[in-house]
């Protein structure tokens, strides 16, 4: 296999992103024929069809999806190489730092972390994308080369294959319900749930609770759940990072004696884990365990 050139990798990324040769050509300032020729050259070098061509544009094949993920990671590594080589003598960290995080982590964990990080390294420019923690979630963004590091929920098995990372803390769940008369048992209220809630870390606990009713309302976003609870529409079982942003009118009751917990940690690629900027971010994350965890629960 002949080596792929950096400009060929950028063309593959553009075609996948734009879902077509013409749009990719416009984005790159090239002709459509030049983009098409470059893709055919890449396919010949790799020995696989990378895109299905049709009236509706170009869609990556399974091989194309894999190739583009590698292309993004290689291009990003080259960009990181330039930034870190230039700062090697004086230790200056500069350039973009791409982070994928689920909403509550982005809202209640990252602000403090990034404030400290950029205070120490003002040349860094964090870019935070909110990614729903379902299916491949934030880890998928990292594996596909769209993020340098992801804040992810991790079970006991750790990061997905091909990635590295660690737990930062365990996040307990609690019962969120409207503030109301003391004689009203919040467990008797209708259940409001959202798509990202629960998973392998709470499934066993959830199945053993015969008081939990089927969801009366299901929404896509945890902030909507909080708004509905504040208006007295029901209760929900929610992780503490989400409840850190609970509006007035919501009470939080511990789930005794042993609440379910989920692990919150970071994932990155092996090559990104070697970069000074990602290592600096990880150090700040490790020192930023939320108050409820206790310092001894943060993974060091």
Image (cartoon, rainbow, N blue to C red):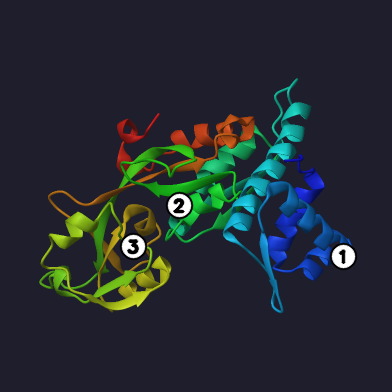
**Cα gap from disc 1 to disc 2, whole angstroms:** 44 Å
**Quarter holding the N terminus?**
top right
- Vertical relation: 135 (above or below) 139: below
Mark number displayed over residue 105: 2
Q: Judge whether 121 appears above or below 224 on screen.
A: above
Nearest the eye: 169 or 269: 269
Q: CA distance from mark 2 to mark 3?
A: 14 Å
* C-alpha separation, residue under disc 3 versus residue under disc 1: 47 Å
Residue found at x 31% / y 58%: 199
Q: Which residue is mark 3?
A: 197
Percent position (x, y) of residue 234?
A: 25, 75
Badge 3, how many Cα within 10 Å: few under 14, some, many 20+?
some
Residue lying at the far top in this picture: please name it.
89
Marking on residue 207: none
What SS does tag 1 mark? Answer: helix
Image x and y of residue 189, in percent = 19, 75
**In the rendered image, the vertical position of residue 171 relative to residue 133, given as above or below:** above
Element carrying mark 3 = loop
């Amino acid at each position: 296999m002949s080596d792929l050139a950096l400009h060929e990798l950028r063309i593959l990324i553009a075609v996948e992103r734009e879902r077509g040769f013409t749009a990719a050509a416009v984005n790159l300032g090239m002709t459509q024929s030049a983009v098409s020729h470059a893709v055919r050259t890449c396919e010949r070098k790799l020995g696989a069809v990378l895109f299905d061509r049709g009236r509706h544009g170009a869609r990556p094949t399974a091989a194309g999806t894999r190739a583009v993920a590698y292309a993004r990671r290689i291009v990003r590594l080259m960009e990181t190489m330039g930034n870190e080589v230039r700062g090697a003598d004086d230790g200056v960290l500069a350039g973009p730092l791409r982070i994928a995080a689920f909403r509550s982590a982005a809202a209640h964990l990252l602000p403090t972390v990034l404030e400290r990080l950029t205070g120490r390294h003002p040349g860094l420019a964090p870019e935070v994308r909110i990614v729903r923690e379902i299916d491949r979630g934030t880890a998928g963004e990292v594996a596909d080369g769209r993020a340098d590091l992801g804040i992810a929920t991790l079970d006991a098995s750790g990061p997905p294959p091909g990635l590295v990372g660690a737990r930062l803390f365990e996040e307990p769940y609690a019962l969120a319900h409207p503030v109301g008369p003391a004689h009203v048992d919040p467990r008797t209220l209708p259940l409001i749930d959202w798509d990202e809630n629960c998973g392998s870390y709470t499934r066993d606990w959830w199945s053993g609770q015969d008081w939990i009713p089927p969801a009366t309302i299901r929404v896509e976003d945890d902030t909507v759940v909080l708004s509905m609870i504040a208006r007295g529409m029901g209760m929900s079982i929610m992780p503490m990072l989400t409840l850190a942003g609970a509006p007035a009118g919501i009470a939080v009751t511990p789930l005794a004696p042993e609440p379910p917990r989920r692990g919150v940690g970071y994932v990155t690629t092996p090559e990104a884990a070697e970069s000074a900027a990602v290592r600096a971010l990880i150090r700040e994350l490790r020192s930023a365990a939320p108050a409820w965890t206790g310092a001894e629960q943060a993974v060091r």
